Image (spheres, rainbow, N blue to C red):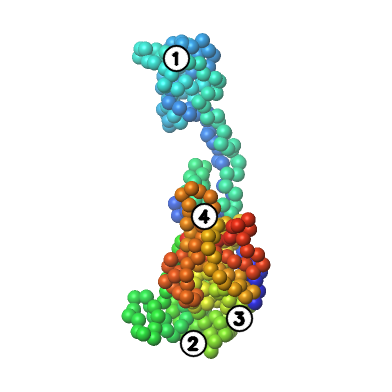
Amino acid sequence: MIPPAEALARVLANCSPLPAERVPLLEATGRVLARPVRADRDLPPAARSAMDGFAVRAADLAAAPVELRLVGEVAAGASARPRVRPGTCVRIFTGANIPPGADAVAIVETTDEVAPDRIAFRAPVEPAENIFPRGENARKGQVLLEKGAFLGPMQVAVCASVGADPVSVVAQPRVGVICSGRELVDSTQRAAPHTERNSNGPALCAALALSGLAQCRVCALAEDDPRDLARKARRALKHCDVLLFVGGVSVGRYDFVPRVIADLGCTTIFHGVAMKPGKPILFARTAVRQLVFGLPGNPLSAMTGFHEFVLPALRKLSGLGEPHRPRLLVRVNRLPEIKLGGRTRFLPSRLRFDADGGAPVAEPVETHSSADLVAGGRCDGVLVLPVESGARDGLYEFHPWRMAL
């Protein structure tokens, strides 16, 4: 067995971002930029008013109170350019271009309209007051979003503002999930006393959807039969960049996945990690660098393996510059008495945020085994208890399962 940190390092060493593709901007949310996005013009492209009021020459208001003659109006989006000359002003609205001759904006709250064409100003203004200068946010050609940036709502807004539509993003990894076990039936079927409804398949498809990083292209059941497993794996690998076997990965009589992976011509990178749950996890690579994971069939083991190794791989394949899984530092009020036994423990836990602030608190959930699916439904992620160290300044590491990133 190898430590979890070494296993993760080996996984990431065998991942490279997928090729780029261009997609419409409104379909790019949650994707990762394959090329930088640059400003196609100065932002803002002209000096603009930050407030509703009047465009003026600051020198004309130096002796306020004063009255100026109103010679025009400029609204946001208007192309009008009435010139502000000594003794005159122009009504202006937030976001409108500053008209020629003006060097400040007096807010409407400090003015009175004494006649249709006469405005009284009660206070002076400084030059450039209430003006957004041209290029204040960015200059033409400046990089606004680096390659590897995740496209959330504000990043999409930046792309839209500079006309980056369609946008160049890294292709989404395509993932296949094959759950093996003679006892498994589909979740829509009636379960006999000797069978189990397949929960790992829907759980992993949900985790993929929550991550926003990948497409689940295949979700299939297979018999505990090497021929059935190999046939379904070959079919899945025609359409997938990553294949997840769930179950049949250990060393029991019906654990055929390691043999099938070898028969498919894959190179096994590791099989067995010093962790609990998840000890039998397997990682391999096909001749054309598709990734193959073997996850244990117990639900808590499968989900832990997904978040610790599969999700970081998907992040790197997706082009994210920081491929590691999200982590938090938390307080723990009570730890169960456990023996590490040379393996890093991943304890299913709830996460609680105190109303008074400070570090969040992790509360370990009581579990009967790694097959305790009911306990898994109560947890938000895992509390990590490494072999080599415990708390750092009273804080422990927590890996959330409900955070996409």
Say whether residue 37 is visible: yes
Residue for point 35% across, 81% down: 191
Which residue is disc 1 drawn over? 121
How crowded pointer 4 is (Cα within 10 Å; few <14, some 14-19, many 20+) is rated as: some
* Alpha-carbon span between mark 3 and mark 2: 18 Å
Mark 1 or 2, nearer chain start: 1
Tell me the element at label 3: loop
User: Callout 2 environment at 10 Å: few (<14), some (14 to 19), or many (20+)?
Assistant: some
Would residue 139 be found to the left or right of residue 377 on screen?
A: right
For mark 4, what is the residue?
A: 360
Q: Quadrant of the N terminus?
A: bottom right
| C-alpha separation, residue under disc 1 versus residue under disc 2 | 87 Å
Mark 3 lies on residue: 265
Amino acid type shown at disc 4: Pro
Q: Quadrant of residue 111?
A: top left
Whole-percent x, y for residue 267 in the image = 63, 78
